[in-house]
Image (cartoon, rainbow, N blue to C red):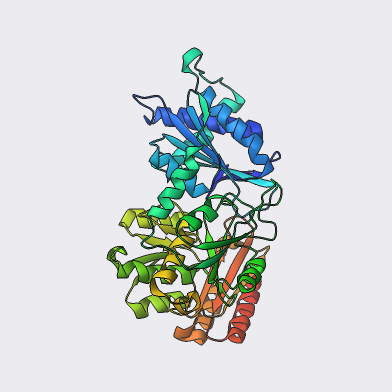
Amino acid sequence: MGRLFGTDGVRGVANADLTAELALGLSVAAAHVLAEAGTFEGHRPTAVVGRDPRASGEFLEAAVVAGLASAGVDVLRVGVLPTPAVAYLTGALDADLGVMLSASHNAMPDNGIKFFARGGHKLPDELEDRIEAVYEEHRTGEPWDRPTGAGVGRVRDYDEGFDKYVTHLVEALPNRLDGLKIVLDEAHGAAFEVSPEAFRRAGAEVVTIGAQPDGLNINDGYGSTHLERLKAAVVEHGADLGIAHDGDADRCLAVDHTGEEVDGDQILSILALAMRERSTLRRDTVVATVMSNLGFKLAMEREGIHLVQTAVGDRYVLEEMKDKGYALGGEQSGHVIILDHATTGDGTLTGLMLAARVAETGRTLRDLASVMERLPQVLINVPDVDKTRVKTSAELAAAITEAEQELGETGRVLLRPSGTEPLVRVMVEAADIDQARTVASRLADAVKSALG
């Protein structure tokens, strides 16, 4: 799999790329590396371990738990809970380590391992690199130094985690959701029980779809990457809005009462205005990536809210937020981070906050979302090109300049090498969809000519 740790932990096809042996070995390595770093000093270490409902999560959880316990780490097994729940519980229980088994929005055959440091924060890159290096050293050579007797880790189920997390979510709300009817699409994923329970406790009338995981159906036609069923259900039930999560529920997209999609940019716009009104939007700033719709940027400028943009990936958004102390950030895909209440994207929290704004204002989600107008956006993937020369090709630079001059201030061009594939992504926004398509197609041809 090349470098094991990607931008969101270790992922691959379960039992092919991501095996029980790898899961066990990485867990032991993580325990040893954190011990070397002094994380466990002066006390007996504890880890929180959770998973999404994938069938492969059952054996991978067993491997992770075995690895940690064999390294002398006590394990609190929280079962099927969202990624942000594991992050929250790691902090709330003062655990030394959190481990989540999930491949998020990926198809069922995939799975992944994500480690959280004390406090529920993502492990720094240098610790991930060290874990990978230590894993490789012991996989091919020197045996582990293993505790015996009372030194081995103890394992117990922590069923209280469910209620503790739901209570945290509901207490974060500025107001209740009484009078709202909401359809929740759980993607047959990790939030299938947590999310409906939180919305009901907050006062909403709840209809669920995609909330019957069987280990095989996660993300299959449901969830934030498949909104068709949610759109139909919202209209059918006469609901005020719909909320869709992905498999590990760290993201949220929404649907208004007419069945129209409300994307991550629009959600950020709504929450930014709500938080500024409550004086919780620190420095009147929101953080987003360069892939955010130009309409979002224009709306924030009009409303007097500063926009800081980062590279693509919620990890970069989070790094900027933590570094500068900002309170709100996210991506068009629905990863929204509300740093006062979560250390990672939390789809259930985001959905609750969005619904709270609808309840508080008495306005429809459609009306609230109209604060920004999404400009037509066209994305073309150009495969089999030398993506390393995107920034150095004079021919391509000339084509980009020409496109930008044509679009003026009402459009935007972004060329981005893929981080995982041999292709270049061409994104064009314009006030008119036909113009966006024409310019994008011309730029895609220029990429083939210059880098092919």
Res. 349 in view: yes
Q: Is residue 443 left or right of residue 145?
A: right
The residue positioned 49% from the left and 82% from the top of the image is: 411
Percent position of residue 364, x then y: 48, 76
Percent position of residue 279, x then y: 28, 66
Percent position of residue 331, x then y: 49, 63
Q: Quadrant of the N terminus?
A: top right
The residue positioned 50% from the left and 34% from the top of the image is: 158
**Residue 423 position (above or below residue 31):** below
**Residue 288 position (above or below residue 431):** above
**Residue 148 position (above or below residue 450):** above
Q: Nearer the viewer, residue 35 or 1?
A: 35
**Count of labels shown?**
0
Q: Quadrant of the C terminus?
A: bottom right
Res. 124 in view: no
* Image quarter of residue 449: bottom right
Q: Nearer the viewer, residue 174 or 223?
A: 174
**Residue 449 position (above or below residue 341):** below
The residue positioned 38% from the left and 75% from the top of the image is: 300
Residue lying furthest top: 149
* Image quarter of residue 357: bottom left
The residue positioned 45% from the left and 57% from the top of the image is: 349
Percent position of residue 267, x then y: 47, 68
Q: Is residue 199 left or right of residue 324?
A: right
